[in-house]
Image (cartoon, grey):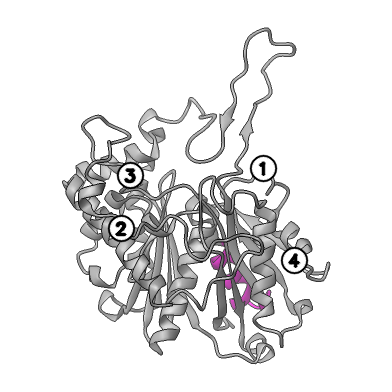
Amino acid sequence: MIRDVYIVDAVRTPVGKYGGALSGIRPDDLAALVLRGLLDRTPGLDPARIDDVFLGNANGAGEENRDVARMAVLLAGLPVTVPGVTVNRLCASGMEAVVQAARAVAVGDASVAIAGGVESMSRAPWVLPKPERAFPAGHQELYSTTIGWRMVNERLRPEWTVALGEGAELVADKHGITREQQDAFAAASHEKAALAWKNGLYDGEILPVDGVPLSRDETIRDTTSTEKLATLRTVFREDGTVTAGNSSPLNDGAAALLLVDEDGLAATGREPLARIRASAVTALEPQLFGLGPVEAVRKALAKAGRGFGDLTTVELNEAFAAQALGCLAELPELDPDLVNPRGGAIAIGHPLGASGARITGAVAHQLAAAGSGLGLASLCIGVGQGLALVLER
């Protein structure tokens, strides 16, 4: 029998900028912080009841190596009997962790699970591949693991391995999305995020980071405007449209959610934020990764037996303004006024492994604040995938 899966709580750190307030904190410590903080908010739950911890991480080459989920369990002071597994679906790793945890609960493999994600792009290491032959006389090349392609297999088609920003330019080309439209979308993201923080809409999900003077997401620019954004140079093409201002920044952060079945819910003594209805993953041409959410959203809603008209809130991760606008162009049934009501990743930030957990938690909190409704969260994924999740309250 398939069980209902409830989200009891969702927390996250404020998102730090690259080289900013959170750059001095190891990713395993960031992950431990959200695990500990999540459980501290549900004191009636015995941590020994946790059947598994699923954490997303897109890097895995640095301090988060060797299964950061298990390391975080130990660093958070959970019982050593609590297992942990790390999953990687690049930008959607945090949501993939939620999906896998929900699946475990739904089929009865777990009654209580934690899902989330972590990324420290500031602390992502350089890597040095081993040489093909011993004692090389020439120079060796270091690769940054912060973001994007590295050590690319020559057998992959060249059009598949373009830079992420070039992929956004391709989406802009396909749908005729102008620089002005992208800058306006980016400015709106900052405006909505700043207003949400000012009105205390994020207070219920943010955990303070001890010793770090970071009271809100670090990359929100209250005073930005389309005029200011228009002064920025393009990054990926001289005659292009994609700039640092209409793209998501590089970030650090962590998020976690508590997932339970009916028995687990009784053990928490709490009212759930939302229930997980359905999820879907799809794939497409790698260079058009930005459009990955389109079919994933359609598939997830169909699996939930619901339509676009039933939605009351949507979180669409903003990897690039061009990418998000491209998805909206291909989803004309989706009311754009429902999308990212509290700002998106262009303003808030995109710590790769954590973002999927962050936007899932955001939808859950928005549904709880409304009292009822149907929510959707979705992300594009590098190398050409999309992931979507439907929640209900």
> At 36% from the left edge and 53% from the top edge, which residue is drawn?
292
Q: Judge whether 115 appears above or below 24 on screen.
A: below
Q: CA distance from mark 3 to mark 4?
A: 39 Å
- Nearer the N terminus, badge 1 or badge 3? 1
Q: Which residue is mark 2?
A: 223
Disc 3 vs disc 4: which is toward the camera?
4
Residue type of the residue flagged with mark 2: Thr
Q: Position of residue 284 (x, y in %)?
A: 36, 48
Q: At x 46% / y 74%, what residue is drawn? A: 202
Q: Residue at x 23, y 45 (%)?
A: 172
From the image, give the main secondary structure of the stretch colored magenta: helix
Q: Amino acid at mark 3?
A: Leu
Residue 68, percent from left and from top: 69, 54
The residue pinned by badge 1 equals 62
Residue behind mark 4: 76
Residues rendered magenta in the picture: 97-112
Residue beneath disc 3: 288
Numbered disc 4: secondary structure: loop
Q: Which mark is residue 265?
A: none
* Distance from Cα at disc 4 to Cα at disc 1: 19 Å
Q: Residue at x 68, y 77 (%)?
A: 39
Gap in angstroms between the C-alphas marked 2 and 1: 35 Å
Label located before the other in sequence (2 or 4): 4
**Front residue of 73 and 306:** 73
Q: Amino acid at mark 1?
A: Gly
Tag 1 secondary structure: loop
